[in-house]
Amino acid sequence: MASHSGAQAADEPRLVGRELELLLVREHVHEAAAGRAVLLRGPSGIGKTRLMRAALAELADGTRVLTARCAENTTGAYETVRALFEPLGLADAAPQDHPLLRGSARLALPALTPDGAPGAVPADTYAVMHGLYWLTAALAAQGPLVLAVDDAQWCDEASLRWLGFLLRRAEDLPVALFLTLRGGTGAVRPEVLDEIADNAACLTVDVQPLTEEAVGDLLRATLGAAPAPEVVAECAEVTGGTPFLVQLVAEHLKERAPAAGPGRAALSEGLGRSAVARFQIDRLTPEQLAVARAIAVLEAGDIETVAALAGTRPGPADGAAQALRAAGLLRADSLEYKHDLVRQAVLEATPSAEQVALRERAARLLNDSGHPTEEVAGQLMLLPGEPAPWMVTVLRSAALGAEQRGAPATAGQYLTRALRHDPDDVALLSALARVLAHNDHHTALSHLEHALSLTADAGTRCRLVLQYAVTSLGVQNSLRAFDLVGEALELARARLGESPADRALRTRVEAMFLVAGLDEKTTVRRVGEHFRGHRPPPGETAEERLLLGMLCALGTLQGRPAAELVPAAEHVLRVGDVSLGGWGALGAGLTLWLADEIEPVEAALTALLGHAQRRGEAWTCALASSTRAEVRLWAGDINRAVADAQFAFDLVHRDLDVPTAVGPQCVLATASVHRGEARRAEEILDLVTRPRLDHFTLEYHTYLMARARTRAALGDPEGALGHLLRCGDSLAETGIDSPVLAPWWYDAAQLLAELGRPAEGRDIVERIAPSVRRWDTARAHGMLAVARGALTPGDAGIDLLAEAARLLDGTPGRLEHARAEYLLGRRLLDRGDAPAARERLRRAIDVAVLCGNRLLVDQAVPVLTAAGGRLRRGTESPADALSGSERQVAERAAAGATNREIAEALFLTQRTVEFHLTSVYRKLGIRGRQELAAALARGRDSGE
């Protein structure tokens, strides 16, 4: 028999007329064998809860059932989740001691704690849901698990979103969800519930009214005798076949005509609006009615709180509750109504002004007696009008608790309500904008605009502008933010003092002027002019290092000498207190990797990625992994770049649903081109949908380069050249003079040489040559020599290509080195020097194989054959066939990680990890994990 946790009904009527629905549910769930959901929909009283409990009662032995019922005042973040897991006692246990709270499952703790810890920082939303998933997985590992939620229309949004999150990932877990949903309450979050209902694993059952035959069965079961057909017909008509109403009418008839049996007259007398409450509400004494109303408002609680709200003492209140049970209004074993229809009837019998007064008094009682603030807020959210000052305090505290649980949408609801008290409260506007920035950037920015219009204080304005600028990045439109930061910068310099706090604030404003100004193309020149001759800060504080890192990024875009920028960039990355994932670190990293200082950047990104994976922060993981993929691609490590890029791509599309992302697609497409998968690269780039893409400084030029290389690999040199020339024009218009940020000229020169248009190519190369000399790295000089050599005929061209190969040999520019050797080999063969050609082509192939550059290998092998040469070794390794996702999984498995650890780190299910490993073993020709490390090492030695 299934084990149940949570409230159970002790006095439910017999279930009739639901055989078909039970059969559908039974066949769909298959005893919770693998990720299933059942959604029972229908009006109040139709029997959804009874049907769900009947279905749960049929589950196989060993199935654990966790249940929760949502109340109308359920608003607290993850309140339903806490109700589901409360029987496990997780919130009271020490995390390190509880077997269910190991690994990523510990990330669920913010959602399981009734009140946030003082001083706790806001939790990452995805991390909390990720943790709850792994907690559920741990429970499911002990046996089949069912999570049942009654009255989901009142479920808090955070819990609903997690249930949808769980369902999307539960295909390999013995987990089933059961939900009942009432229509017509006005409280439904359709976008969340529709996601669950639309999932292929969800069976939606619209529970219909009972047939006349089923009404007769229910009447017979209650009355103990078969009612007359006309009685059945009229009962079915008047109750609409609603089981709860049929049951109440049947019980009434049993009392009214116990001896004579149910007749039509008795039935007619028994029907009417009072039938829902068993005709008892109007007969209640004033004290009983006060207790009934208190219970209806509180929906839960103890007799002491009910008594206080009803204005009486616990003893008389308990007596009144017993009378309500005798009248058939309350359950036999709790202070809960038999059905919400009864509760609603009690509320409808309460004048609206009195309802408001009761809810306000209930909120005060709960607050004064130390109940969690979100429980108090649940009452306040149902009140009309403007909240009182004490209510604002409660709502702000509840919002803070919701933030700490990773539920910013819930925090936004509380703060929006609080703002009614004073729409001009600057601090409240800022707090509301902060939480709305997670999912409603435009509203957040409008609140910040309003706050800025209300204050002239320099410090306050600067902090608001900093918040505005950060928020604006989320909507990919920084122009207004740039103007505001410029104004704030002037204000900061004129009116902020020289205290450490003021200096730090002024430095942050300067740094944000760079962040906002470098985001879009139209403001890059203005940023450069503003900081012309600016003395870099020493980098002694975190704020100074933030500014220093962004100045490094600006200098890189301007094409200043790499040697001047590298020491400052190294300082930014070297000091450990730079916030992980901050703009300063990213700006310094850009400088270093383009200057071919690869190791410190890769080490910093690897540390950031590991930190984010342990904390379940998927967006930071995507950013770090995408950036590391760019670094590895720049260093010629194509296969690992593909693995990183695929991970980032999967996160932003599969898990985070960020349709405006650009970076992961571009780097994955470019790496795919090198692997000889140009068609796939084009499909990936077709997914880029960011509005105004051509306005962005980094993303647009990266996108054009990826498009150009894809078109070239697909045999469309003219199309590729068009993208490259557009990239060059855009960089010039923007004022970007870096020769390596988007090296369009390098690709364009080789395409123009192939197209027989060397004069155009030479003009481009000579225009870019001063920038190469300024940047002054061996790779940049080698790339320039490749471009010149490709465009120069005869021996002079061969000499230039030989010089390029010499310059690039030993640098991180392995892709460019392989290209130089290949072009040199071709030219030597054209000149008739087959032996020298064979030597160069073999070098090209060796380097390309080491890089994983299948495209160049495929180009070079036929030329080598034409030169009379043969390969010294194979150009393929079984490891080359691994996809990016497979490589991520394989490398972690080879390092000793368990399947669960791999799944937690990569935000996958264990089934997906198992699927990838099975594919890896097959492709590598090995039998299992014990051979994996050696197989991957052979791949690196022979071709990667």
Image (cartoon, rainbow, N blue to C red):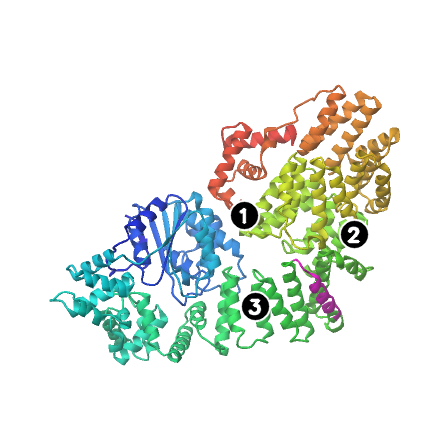
Start-end of magenta stretch? 476-490
Residue 666, above or below 71: above
Quadrant into which the C terminus falls: top right
Question: Position of 773 compared to 173: left or right?
Answer: right
Inspect the image, locate mark 2, and give the three-letter code of the amino acid beneath it: Ile
- Give coordinates of residue 731: x percent, y percent: 78, 50
The dominant secondary structure in magenta is helix
**Quadrant of the image occupied by residue 249:** bottom left
Q: Which residue is mark 2?
A: 736
* Mark nearer the N terminus (1 vs 3): 3
In the image, residue 462 lies in the stretch drawn in magenta: no
Inspect the image, locate mark 1, and give the three-letter code of the amino acid beneath it: Arg
- The residues tagged by marks 2 and 3 sit, at their Cα atoms, a distance apart of 38 Å
Residue 830, above or below 347: above
SS at mark 3 in the image: helix
> Which numbered circle lies on residue 432?
3
Q: Are marks 1 and 3 in contact (CB under 8 Å)?
A: no
Q: Characterize the local packing of mark 1: few (<14), some (14-19) or many (20 or more) Cα atoms within 10 angstroms.
A: few
Q: Residue most toward the left?
A: 259
Q: Along the line of sight, which residue is nearer the eye, 520 or 752?
A: 752
- Give coordinates of residue 365: x percent, y percent: 39, 75
- Give coordinates of residue 36: x percent, y percent: 40, 47
* Mark nearer the N terminus (1 vs 2): 1
- Give coordinates of residue 618: x percent, y percent: 56, 51
Q: Along the line of sight, which residue is nearer the eye, 567 or 170?
A: 170
- The residues tagged by marks 1 and 2 sit, at their Cα atoms, a distance apart of 34 Å
The residue shown at (67%, 23%) is 873
The residue shown at (25%, 58%) is 212
Question: Position of 566 compared to 136: left or right?
Answer: right
Q: Which residue is mark 1?
A: 654
Q: Is residue 743 visible?
A: no
Q: Is residue 498 visible?
A: yes
